[in-house]
Image: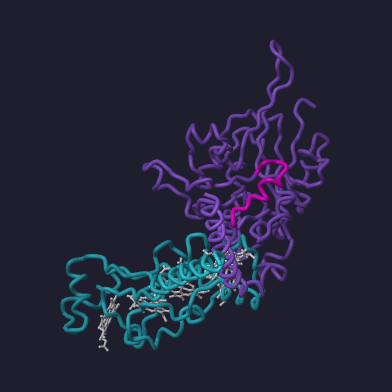
Amino acid sequence: MKDLAAAVLSLAFIGLVWLLLAGYQSGSKKQPVAYNHKKHIALGLECAGCHTGIADGKARGGLPTVEVCAACHTSDDENPRAKAVRDYVSANKPIPWKKVYNVPTHVYFSHRRHVGLAKLDCALCHGDMSKVEAPVTRQAVTISMARCMGCHHRMKVTNDCLACHK
Amino acid sequence: MESLTTSRNGFLRGLLGTLGVFLLSGIGKAWGTAPGDAGHGKRPLKPGEHRWGMVIDLDKCTGCGSCVVACSTENNLALGNPQEAAMGRIIRWLKILPSQEGEFPAPKQRLLPMPCQQCDTPPCTKVCPVYATFRNEEGIVGQVYSRCIGCRYCLNACPYTCKDFNWKAPVWPKEMQASFNPDVSIRPKGVVEKCLFCHHRLQRAKEEAVAEGRPLRENDYQPACAEICPAKAIVFGDLNNNDSDAANLSKDPRAFHLLEELGAEPKVTYLKEGA
């Protein structure tokens, strides 16, 4: 009887944790500017033009700095929907983008290895960004160990725990 | 009193049981493709191409302790405090083991630097119930902290006392908190940790090798202790490479292994002093 009560109690506890975690996962990270990938990629811009640090794996180099936007969103730009960007540009303040794709701190991931060297397509891990009109608030392709290992298995790359876990 | 403890045990049992199922279902997905079929990096790196090992020349070692310091900063080891020291809970992946021969007035002090011996048949991995510790294809005995459940079987199985348990979450003085090594994670409370031959340096070296389109060279990869040793007493390299210093020195007539009779086949070789 006590065991039953204990089991029910612990299940309830785990359910609660689950809900909290799920809430955290989808916890729609609102982006500061209503950025539109589709429109910019349609202009012929390359991913690497904005995500400058990706191919050489610079730490925290992944999300664009305000200087990148400043090249086009100058005071001559009159697009009302881009006003938020111009405000950041004229104040020369960094845009506080929220990083949506994250690996836990105990995992080692290198864009340089995957993109710079192995020349993998961004879409394999981030979906087709040229169709994305809303700012990124959740992962289009969920990061999971099973996905990492699945691809490594297919491409005959090591699946040694030590390669990814630090 | 009696009923209190039993019900608490019941609760814990239930909790552990459900947690166990929870964990297993999570990792189950990954097990399908997991360790057995671990192919190795396709380009320059082939399976089992390397077998990493270390030689420590006790004749050259002065016991200065540089290796201990280098290891501790490289791997984000907490400093510890006197209370922990008194309980034997200071964590050092590389220790200097003192021993004394003879009595006063003519004692002879011996100092022996002791990293994980990186056994080829490691006693610690055999007892791990969750595959958190294992020997990888290049001979390094790994520990995945996120997988570790803190049962400490491995810690007890290790004849060289080269595994440490985190009795509490590590703490650092404020001044040190901006200088962690980002390539090594901070271990949480409740897991066992160990020397990995600075495996993260191997990852960096491999990435460099791929970038330059060449195989890994001898000396591309050196653990922090070998790099720092001012007396060059620590030699590290690929035991599969007949030209490497480590491979040659490990066949030196002065070579011996600690507790050789246990048959754990360590890949850390010592060179006898005064021989």
**Which color has been applied to chain A in this rendered view?**
cyan
Q: Which quadrant holds residue A148? A: bottom right
Residue appearing at x 53%, y 73% in the figure: A144
Task: Examine the rendered structure and indicate whether residue A108 appears above or below residue A84.
Answer: above
Residue bounds of the magenta highlight: B149-162
Outermost residue on the top side: it is: B105
Q: Is residue A165 left or right of residue B119?
A: left
Work out whether residue A10 or residue B3 is closer to the camera in this orientation and state it: B3
Q: Is residue B251 left or right of residue A23?
A: right
Work out whether residue B90 or residue B77 is closer to the camera in this orientation and state it: B90
Which chain has been coloured purple in this picture? B
Q: Which of the image's four quarters has the C terminus of chain A?
A: bottom right
Q: From this viewpoint, is residue B211 visible?
A: no
Magenta region includes residue B161: yes
Q: Which of the image's four quarters has the N terminus of chain A?
A: bottom right
- In x, y percent, where is residue A21? 43, 70
- In x, y percent, where is residue A129? 41, 83
Residue appearing at x 55%, y 39% in the figure: B89
Work out whether residue B259 or residue B255 is closer to the camera in this orientation and state it: B259
Magenta region includes residue B210: no
- In x, y percent, where is residue A118? 56, 73
Q: In this view, does A45 lie to the left or right of B85?
A: left
Residue appearing at x 54%, y 31% in the figure: B86
Predominant SS of the magenta segment: loop
Q: Is residue A22 left or right of residue B152?
A: left
